[in-house]
Image: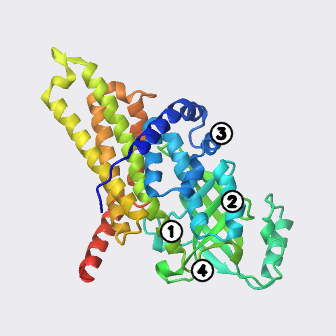
Amino acid sequence: MPAFSLDPPQTAWCADLRTLAAERLRPLAEKGEPGHVNRPLVAELGQLGLLKRLFTSGAVDLCLMRESLAYACTEAETALALQGLGAHPVHAYGTEAQRDRWLPQVVEGSAVAAFALSEPGAGSDAAALGLRAEPEEQGEGGRREAAREGAGSARTPDASLAAHSDGRTRWRLTGEKCWISNAPEADFYTVFARTTPGAGARGVTAFLVPADRPGLTGTGLDMLSPHPIGALTFDAVPVTADDVLGEPDRGFRVAMGTLNLFRPSVGAFAIGMAQAALDATLVHTARRDAFGGKLKDLQTVAHQVAEMALRTEAARLMVYAAATAYDEDAPDVPKRAAMAKLLATETAQYVVDTAVQLHGARALRRGHLLEHLYREVRAPRVYEGASEVQRGIIAKELYANMEAGQ
């Protein structure tokens, strides 16, 4: 695989994105309420054409967008990424009807998407999902729906559930999801549920579930990161074969296909934050007077700054190598994606922490760039597969290649 480098149009595009993020997106982000979906911000991402690029460009472009936006406005970066994460399964595995129903709204920023995989007892272990998709007897749906409506349900059933006399396969979703970004305020969810008990990863099905389905409720969670995260409760939520993404019992492939695309771009998000912290540190240490000179003249400080830059650039190269591998449909994408996310997120944590140390107490003051980045940088080491999970994936892929004689 050739070494990755930006060509002049890509370099110019990234500069434009950083400017747009600072001048048009950050003001909207600052007006948002932490822990809630910022719909004006999402709509502006659509107006700028960035949401459309989620589905018309490759992994490298996705990484360029996420790194550039993260450098100047982490909230805009996260809003864009969550639209992609929640809607990519619809784009890649959905039916024509599913795509026509939801993707135009996602692209224009009028519908908010969410990726509902994690559960209270099954976070990084996606094969251990407990949300049940129980087959429904013919005619049972009408009786249960009538009972629910008679009990005073405030939700209006989705139009696709209006008639169940055609014999289509249908299920009831029962259980919980937790740590779901954009929940409970999303307009639809890509939900992964167990359709075959005891089958591990082979018995999971992906469903497209509109938020107005009867029996689906949620609550927000007060988290360290400012973007919305919540829990969802499924109380016999009705779904049919028309809501399946991909094939029944093949939902794990939908989940992993989505994560293989987005894991390197999580690394790009992390690199954007690391670069912002590094640049802030360069300015601060060049201006700050200490011990009769500038802070940068202290060898220990200069060496720390060099280490920050070294690690950031190494992680950046691995992120874009993984994205290039994805775009070229290389056979080792899972390993490269895991390596990229692991190295980039761990690097960003180190760089931001070191930047805080070199800035001193001012960096801990509420509203300081580094105070903001310090809160933002921690979560990527956990979500979409914790660092420990990435190490497990890397080792598994290495041994599989060895056994295959590669």
User: Marks 4 and 1: CB-CB under 8 Å?
Assistant: no
Q: Is residue 73 visible?
A: no
Tell me the amino acid under the disc marked 4.
Pro
Above or below, 6 relative to 31: below
**Count of number-bearing discs:** 4
Question: Residue 248 — which label?
Answer: 4
> Of callouts 2 and 3, which one flags the residue occurring earlier in the amino acid sequence?
3
Tell me the amino acid under the disc marked 2.
Trp
Q: Which residue is mark 2?
A: 102
Above or below, 320 relative to 327: above
- Give the distance between the C-alpha atoms of the residues marked 4 and 1, in whole angstroms: 13 Å
Left or right, 168 with reference to 263: right
> Of callouts 2 and 4, which one flags the residue occurring earlier in the amino acid sequence?
2
Nearer to us of marks 2 and 1 is 2
> Of callouts 3 and 1, which one flags the residue occurring earlier in the amino acid sequence?
3
- Give the distance between the C-alpha atoms of the residues marked 2 and 4, in whole angstroms: 21 Å
In percent of width and height, residue 68 lies at 44, 41
Q: Nearer the viewer, residue 342 or 181?
A: 342
Q: Is residue 294 visible?
A: yes
Q: Nearer the viewer, residue 170 or 315?
A: 315
Question: Residue 40 — which label?
Answer: 3
Q: Name the residue at 48% across, 58% down.
A: 58
Q: Nearer the viewer, residue 314 or 135?
A: 314
Q: Which residue is mark 1?
A: 255
Left or right, 284 with reference to 158: left
Tell me the amino acid under the disc marked 3.
Pro
Q: Secondary structure at mark 1?
A: helix
